[in-house]
Amino acid sequence: MLDELEKGPWPSHVTELKKGQYPIKAYARGLGEGLSPWFGGSARIRCEFTGFIARRTKDGQQTEVHFRIYHPSGQFYRTDELRKLLDFCDKFGLGSVETVGQTGDLVMPIQPELADQAVDELRALGTDIGGTGDTFRDSAACVGPALCEYALFDSLAARDYFFRYPAFYEKLASQPFPFKIKLKFSACPMDCARAAHRADFAFVGLWEGAPEVDPTALRAKVEAGEVSGKDLAARCPGKAIRWNSSTQELSIDGAKCKKSMNCIRQAFPAIKPGPNRKIAFMMGGHSKGRSGPKMAKPVALLDDWKSAAEFMDRVMAHWSDRSPHKDRLGDLLVEEGFEKVVDQFKEHLPVEPAGHVVGAPRIVNSSVLTDQERETFAAWADAIAREYEG
């Protein structure tokens, strides 16, 4: 199987693994069995409680430690910094590195006997290990204003701020929580950081009211065949768009706009986000938890991401005091009630919680149930179960 994976005109990952110290025989055995060749292991690193995972091969012949290394915001690396990390990998690791993954950080296998020295040299490069265990995982931010024309706030600066915020920073190297906690920052409602789906605390850029329309620019796009006004209206999920085919004019009802970005993506810059920009602050999202995956729910519309920090710190302390091991923040919000938790700490927010108020802008790009809706559907499910199961 290894021989086959080295054939062909394309680059082979097997050939690359053979260049380093990766246990290629164990990898081959795993391919043949159709199972991972690795078992969990244990490791002890001086003055470190998080940021690494130990493992060993099933035959016990090979061990290694995974370092999870903090990315810079937006995962923007200077080439000289990246070269230093690769040299570090060659010196302390097995010659391989994972730069993309669900964890959001850089993963590097390290020789266990060199782990203590590796931590010191890694810090000398300006980064550190972290993001495992019952603590903060590496916060993720979309590329934001660095590359994206849709960015409505500086997601990179926001991630940097919370990464350095004293109440959060002091917890990076310890495991003070019942389970992991994630912060994610998306600069527009397209949510490229998947904040609404995967973050305990999510920040998503949006605007109040209707998108801004440039009639002259839009008419030019329609006449050139680049955009169809009729199609924009038909595909609007909130039915907020009206297209007058005789006058070639488009209007948008801001009260119905769901901020889907569909019209903006098709017609930008003739249609672009409205001028009254805000940041949707949400909490409780995750893909894994004791009571199943959940979407984050809206807490408030903010003018500044910094204004949520104290509220977040209070909620995290409450979660740590009340929740059993392996309960995510979203599990606590289900058990105690989302509105109850928000009301308990709302004085630490600069604005009143927005929630799902009639006429208020929708501040997530996917469906989120209110507590009342959740109870209704739960009762309905119980009734069906009793009907069929007796």
Image (spheres, rainbow, N blue to C red):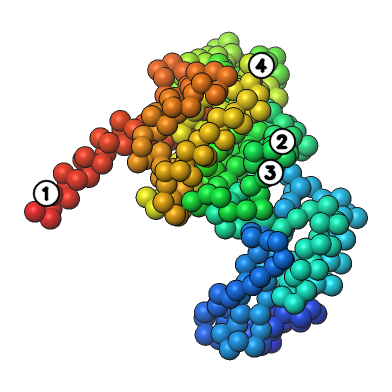
Amino acid bearing label 1:
Glu
Which callout, 3 or 2, points to the residue nearer the camera?
3
Amino acid bearing label 4:
Pro
Left/right placement of residue 152 relative to residue 82 reads left
Q: Position of residue 99 (x, y in %)?
A: 72, 59
Residue at the (68%, 43%) spot, across then down? 169
Picture layout, residue 226 above or below residue 143: above
Picture layout, residue 147 above or below residue 13: above
Question: Distance between the Cα atoms at labels 4 and 3?
Answer: 34 Å
Image quadrant where residue 205 sits? top right
Question: Distance between the Cα atoms at labels 3 and 2?
Answer: 10 Å
Q: Which residue is mark 2?
A: 161
Q: Which residue is mark 4?
A: 275
Residue at the (70%, 61%) spot, across then down? 47
| Dot 2 crowding, Cα within 10 Å, few <14, some 14–19, many 20+ | some
Q: Earlier in the sequence, mark 2 or mark 1?
A: 2
Tag shown at residue 169: 3
Amino acid bearing label 2:
Tyr
| Dot 4 crowding, Cα within 10 Å, few <14, some 14–19, many 20+ | some
Q: Earlier in the sequence, mark 1 or mark 4?
A: 4
Q: Earlier in the sequence, mark 3 or mark 2?
A: 2
